[in-house]
Image (tube, helix red, strand yellow):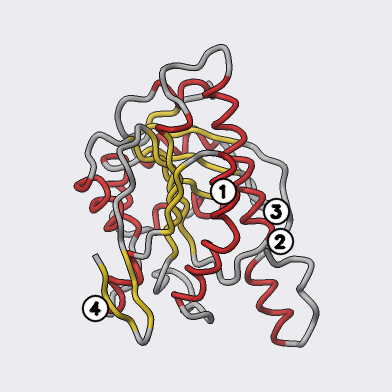
Amino acid sequence: MERISGNRPLKTERLVSVALEFIYGGSFDPLHKGHVNLVKEVIRYVKELTEGESATNISNDSIAFRFLPCATPALKKASESVFVDRSEKLKEIFTDYFLEQKIEMQVDEREGLRSAEHGNKSYTIDSLKELKSENSSTLHFLIIGADNFNSLNCWKNYRELPDYCNLLVINRPKESLNDWMSLAKNYGFEVKQKSNQLLETETTGSCFYLEIAEVDISSTEIRKKIKVNQSVENWLA
């Protein structure tokens, strides 16, 4: 499917049939080394599971990674960069990496399409519902940072999230995660504490936690530095 926004096409495409799909959403405004580190740490973690002694019949060729750039944030200021530019940057930075990892990757532009056609804000629940209807057999794992997890109750229809995805919660610099298991239960998710359970999940509604090496970089801080003409070259992807 293809639509035109300004002078650039926006596309949404289906990935090949996969068993597990990890979804990483956000404004990526701008894309920085913290984002890159998170992606690589998640992929390293997943590959360790698929190649380890406890691995099930899940293999790399049945795993996919979907970037879901946000067009018009619902809870933040509008992005300063054009949607299609942010989308193209994701492809530029990550395409070769995922080819090397032999894991299917897509930059899903449906939220840009939705915004261009209807002027709507980007709501994750709407995208998850669409993805589930497109391939009901795929297990979707939404990657979410500790900051967003702590405020998940502010998301549109957050109570419906367990019906459409599993959560993979990632630690964030300077963001505490006090009793994440109780919080997950309050949101309606079932807590899974063992990492290899991720490969054994058969439905939606499970919540996992992954602690990674932190890279203390913030998109907000980068934009602030840019506005006062400070160098951010070492932070950008």
Q: Earlier in the sequence, mark 2 or mark 1?
A: 1
Q: Residue furthest top?
A: 53
| Left or right for 126, reference 31 | left
Q: Nearer the viewer, mark 2 or mark 3?
A: 2
How far apart are the alpha carbons under marks 3 and 1? 10 Å
Closer to the chain start, of discs 4 and 1, is 4
Helix, strand or loop at disc 2? loop
Q: CA distance from mark 2 to mark 1?
A: 14 Å
- Between discs 2 and 3, the one toward the N terminus: 3
Q: Which residue is mark 1?
A: 146
Vertical arrangement, residue 11 with respect to residue 204, above or below: below
Q: CA distance from mark 4 to mark 1?
A: 32 Å
Q: Quadrant of the C terminus?
A: bottom right
Q: CA distance from mark 2 to mark 4?
A: 33 Å
Instruction: Give the farthest residue toward the left.
Output: 133
Q: Secondary structure at mark 3?
A: loop
Q: Amino acid at mark 2?
A: Ile
- Given residues 213 and 159, the one toward you in this image is 213
How many neighbours does mark 1 have within 10 angstroms: few (below 14), some (14-19), or many (20 or more)?
many
| Residue highlighted by disc 3 | 174
Q: Which residue is mark 4?
A: 117
**Rendered residue at 48%/72% (across/down):** 76
Is 100 located above or below residue 193 in the figure?
A: below
Q: N-terminal of the two: label 3 or label 1?
A: 1
Q: Are marks 2 and 4 in contact (CB under 8 Å)?
A: no
| Quadrant of the frame with the N terminus | bottom left
Of the pair 18 and 157, the residue shown nearer to us = 18
At numbered mark 4, what does the secondary structure look like: helix, strand or loop? helix
- Residue 134, compared with residue 93, is above or below; it is above
Density class for disc 4 (Cα within 10 Å; few <14, some 14-19, many ≥20) is: few
